[in-house]
Image (cartoon, rainbow, N blue to C red):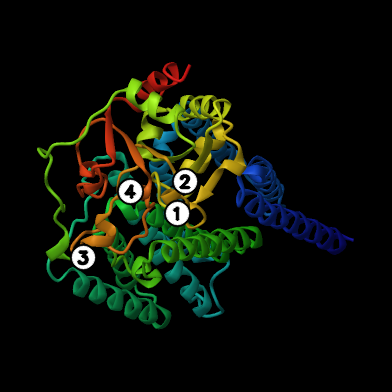
């Protein structure tokens, strides 16, 4: 009778985990489109709630003190952060959360290594199973790389360190040597579970995680965030193997694979090498890491909100190009109102989104959706780039690097080869910016000095509100 009860509990647990896995898959499907993102987010939360409840109710759990204490502390911290965080800080928050997943993988692997009996990882000779050593070694390495790499990404996104590539001679050779050393130590760990080997490969993984992110420039940060998301998924899957938790394995594999696919798609759209992303090799070489393009003292054509309002209300078509400057100023709602007024005047309004605009994948899409911009007016780069040459006005609001012609004309530029939004083809370019400073990648934008460009200096939200008043 007892065995039947145990079997029934195991079956119910497997069924609950299966339901969670299906909900996670549906969540990823929903999050692939702005129209279904809310439903997708809800499915993800529901799936996670079922997975957590199923794990807590497992007969293997005999003490709940530490578990509920951790849930309470984590819940309070999570609610506090969620209620205070601004959309502009979301990318660095995501990077910070990735680091916690990596750290959790390291701590679980470390606990399993120091007390393998508690995890059921010992064979009859009192040695850790070879397959468990493989799982443990890969889990701790991926987790450590995720942790230190995410910390560096956070500091870059938060502005604590420069967003420009940080490079030095011999960097790639050093990374390659460390990578080979880590692979050798993981292989050796399978034969000899020496503490020196385990903690040695853990330390090297922390170091290489730091080194593969620092040479990556700001313009490539969205791809880095996506790639670290993939790493965190594989780290979570490693934890799942160590804990013999199928839900965690499936969840980690879903996050890891979806993050890798998204990174590949973004790299393809940016003309970057996927393998260079994985190896941390795309930012710049030592010879080309300096900011390109000077000319902050060169003359530019400067206009006002009145000038911009007059030009746009007399235009036939306007393409709006949002960027991180819009996010900083929280100008998306005013921008949508401006678009509505232009449409009332008979102007065709479209929004052009670059794959890496902002600081994380989909950053601009989320902001425009928050402002209730119609989805059918928002277009990705490949769908709208040819429209600029027929547009009367390209209205650029805080998007610098993704409109910079240096990506096509300057082989020494850190952003060379990255597809850009061809805003210069429009009859008039209105560029909203606080000043003449270079973009996040540290590259001066030659677009500022074109004859058909008018600079609108000032806070993005105040400028848009000023334009709005002049559309009446």
Query: For residue 352, which numbered disc appears in the image?
Result: 2
The reply to whether dot 1 and dot 2 touch (C-beta < 8 Å) is yes
Q: CA distance from mark 4 to mark 3?
A: 19 Å
Residue 151 seen in the current view? no
Residue drawn at x 48%, y 58% is 382
Question: First in sequence: mark 2 or mark 3?
Answer: 2
Question: First in sequence: mark 2 or mark 4?
Answer: 2
Q: CA distance from mark 1 to mark 3?
A: 22 Å
The picture quadrant where one finds residue 282 is bottom left
Q: CA distance from mark 1 to mark 2?
A: 8 Å
Residue drawn at x 47%, y 51% is 387
CA neighbours of label 2 inside 10 A, class few (<14), some (14 to 19), many (20+): many
Q: Viewer-proximal residue, 128 or 346?
A: 346
Residue 358 horizontal/vertical position (percent): 39, 44
Question: First in sequence: mark 4 or mark 3?
Answer: 3
Residue at which label 4 appears:
424
Residue 188 horizontal/vertical position (percent): 36, 81
Residue drawn at x 55%, y 32% is 370
Residue at which label 1 appears:
385
Residue at which label 3 appears:
411
The reply to whether dot 2 and dot 4 touch (C-beta < 8 Å) is no
Above or below, comparing residue 276 to residue 459 in the picture: below
Label 1: which secondary element = helix
Label 2: which secondary element = strand
Q: CA distance from mark 2 to mark 4?
A: 13 Å
């Amino acid at each position: 009778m007892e065995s039947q009860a145990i079997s029934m509990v195991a079956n119910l647990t497997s069924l609950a985990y299966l339901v969670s896995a299906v909900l996670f898959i549906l969540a990823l499907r929903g999050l692939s489109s702005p129209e279904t993102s809310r439903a997708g987010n809800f499915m993800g939360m529901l799936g996670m709630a079922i997975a957590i409840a199923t794990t807590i109710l497992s007969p293997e759990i005999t003490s709940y003190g530490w578990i509920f204490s951790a849930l309470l502390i984590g819940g309070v911290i999570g609610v506090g952060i969620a209620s205070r965080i601004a959309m502009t800080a979301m990318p660095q928050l995501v990077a910070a959360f990735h680091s916690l997943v990596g750290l959790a993988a390291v701590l679980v692997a470390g606990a399993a290594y120091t007390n393998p009996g508690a995890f059921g990882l010992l064979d009859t000779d009192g040695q850790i199973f070879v397959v468990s050593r493989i799982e443990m070694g890969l889990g701790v390495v991926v987790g450590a790389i995720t942790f230190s790499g995410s910390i560096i990404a956070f500091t870059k996104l938060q502005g604590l360190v420069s967003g420009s590539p940080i490079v030095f001679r011999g960097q790639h050779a050093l990374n390659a040597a460390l990578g080979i050393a880590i692979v050798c130590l993981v292989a050796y760990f399978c034969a000899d579970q020496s503490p020196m080997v385990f903690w040695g490969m853990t330390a090297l993984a922390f170091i290489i995680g730091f080194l593969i992110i620092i040479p990556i420039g700001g313009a490539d940060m969205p791809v880095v965030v996506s790639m670290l998301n993939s790493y965190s998924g594989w780290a979570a899957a490693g934890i799942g193997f160590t804990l013999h938790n199928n839900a965690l394995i499936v969840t980690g594999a879903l996050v890891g694979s979806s993050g890798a696919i998204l990174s590949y798609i973004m790299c393809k759209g940016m003309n970057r090498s996927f393998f260079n992303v994985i190896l941390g090799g795309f930012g710049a070489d030592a010879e080309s890491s300096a900011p390109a393009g000077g000319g902050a003292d060169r003359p530019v054509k400067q206009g006002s909100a009145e000038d911009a309002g007059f030009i746009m209300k007399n235009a036939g078509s306007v393409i709006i190009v949002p960027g991180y400057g819009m996010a900083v100023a929280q100008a998306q709602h005013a921008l949508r109102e401006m678009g509505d007024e232009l449409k009332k005047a008979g102007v065709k309004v479209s929004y052009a989104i670059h794959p890496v605009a902002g600081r994380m994948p989909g950053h601009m899409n989320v902001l425009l959706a928050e402002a209730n911009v119609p989805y059918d007016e928002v277009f990705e780069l490949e769908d709208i780039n040819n429209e600029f040459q027929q547009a009367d006005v390209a209205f650029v609001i805080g998007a610098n690097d993704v409109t910079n012609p240096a990506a096509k004309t300057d082989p020494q530029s850190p952003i060379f080869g990255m597809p850009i939004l061809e805003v210069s083809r429009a009859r008039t370019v209105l560029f909203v910016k606080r000043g003449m400073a270079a973009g996040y990648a540290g590259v001066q934008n030659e677009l500022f000095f074109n004859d058909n460009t008018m600079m609108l200096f000032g806070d993005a939200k105040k400028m848009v509100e000023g334009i709005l008043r002049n559309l009446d």
